[in-house]
Amino acid sequence: MSALPEVSQASFQTDVLASEQPVLVDFWAPWCGPCRMLAPVVEKVAAAHAGRAKFVKLNTDENPSLSGEYHVSGIPCLILFKGGQAVDRIVGFVPEQHITQMLAKHVA
């Protein structure tokens, strides 16, 4: 369904928290309509930021403990991690420009 790689509880430490690059994590679920609408928007932003940031998806149904740990109460939820810390987030469906503006604050 998505061109973005999936992360899980098992790979989160390595793929997100220990990443040298900023990582945008798309917290989503298969039953979530706005999540499916946002996916191609995130993929477009990911293509435009290739090499400067990583983009991954996390299925909240399959990884409820991570959703709880990062206080994800609504999806879709995009959380930007930098240096192992959550530094910014967007909740709900937003236009591409909102995601690009958030990244511009944190990604060189």
Image: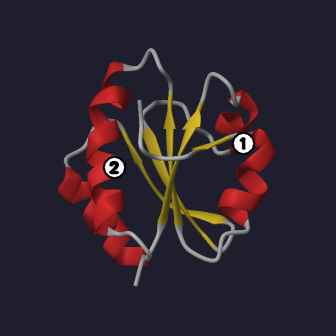
Name the residue at the right extreme: 10
Quadrant of the image occupied by residue 71: top right
Residue for badge 1: 69
Tag 1 secondary structure: helix
Residue 27 percent location from the top left of the image:
52, 38
Q: Residues within 10 Å of mark 1 (few under 14, many from 20)?
A: few
Residue for badge 2: 43
Rendered position, 34 above or below 4: above
Rendered position, 30 above or below 70: above
Residue 86 percent location from the top left of the image:
59, 61
Q: Amino acid at mark 2?
A: Glu
The residue drawn where x is 27% and y is 30% is 37
The residue drawn where x is 68% and y is 25% is 62
Name the residue at the bottom extreme: 108
Tag 2 secondary structure: helix
Residue 108 percent location from the top left of the image:
40, 85
Q: Is residue 95 left or right of residue 36?
A: left
Label 1 and label 2: CA atoms lie apart by 25 Å
The residue drawn where x is 36% and y is 59% is 46
The residue drawn where x is 36% and y is 76% is 105
Quadrant of the image occupied by residue 50: bottom left
